[in-house]
Image: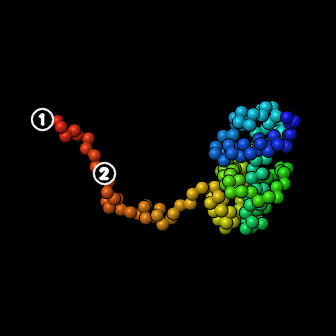
Amino acid sequence: MPRNPEVTQQRLIDTAAEIMATVGIAGLRVDQLAERTRVNKRMIYHYFANKEGLARRVLAEQVHCLCIGLPNLEEDLASFLRRELMADVGISERSAVPGTEQMRLAAKVVLRGFMDGYGSGRRLPEAQWRTLFPPLLRLAVHETLDLDAESKRSFTPKSTEQKPRYQLRPGFRRE
């Protein structure tokens, strides 16, 4: 089977994105990535120079995916994401709209990137944060919460709930 560096790089990026979505950038281990993808660790360093380069490439791919997949994302927010997380990393141009699972993964990775402190730290006005984060959170969280049920549950007085009562004393003991 002939080797294809582009396919190998994309496989590494996709697997690293899955790892970063669950454990963050700090939890990404090159040894673990090499084992999961069955790619020599030396080749990972050859393609991406270091773990930081791999993380930047993954973030760039996921930002690109979000910018394509969210058609109603304002241009200034999309350019903010590109400026903050892509950092002139060359990515393969995808023109197809990504699927739901790919969008969820992209939202998780981008949110993790912000939580892990990636980006230049430029401040985005609060109104734009309020526009950017709710769609990312909705994408990242699989199930949506029923807010009415949550508010009823949290404001229900404790005395009205019937809880089972258990006795720790055995009833068969004679005195």
The correct choice, above or below, for 58 with respect to 156 in the image is above
Q: Amino acid at mark 1?
A: Glu
Q: Of label 1 and label 2, which has the lower sequence position? A: 2
Q: Amino acid at mark 2?
A: Pro
Quarter of the rendering containing residue 54: top right
Write the residue at 63% across / 62% down. Answer: 134
Task: Determine which of the numbered discs, if any, sits on residue 175 in the image.
Answer: 1
SS label for mark 2: loop
Q: Which of 68/55 is in front?
A: 68
- Give the color scheme: rainbow, by chain, secondary structure or one colour: rainbow
Q: Which residue is mark 2?
A: 164
The correct choice, above or below, for 119 with respect to 126 in the image is above
Report the side of 49 relative to 132 (left or right): right
Q: Position of residue 43 (x, y in %)?
A: 82, 34
The outermost residue toward the front is 1
Q: Position of residue 16 (x, y in %)?
A: 72, 43
Q: Position of residue 9 (x, y in %)?
A: 81, 42
Write the residue at 22% across / 38% down. Answer: 170
Report the side of 81 relative to 90 (left or right): left
Q: Is residue 110 visible?
A: no
Write the residue at 80% across / 58% down. Answer: 96
Q: Which of 99/90 is in front?
A: 99
- In the rendered image, the quadrant that contains the N terminus is top right
Quarter of the rendering containing residue 128: bottom right
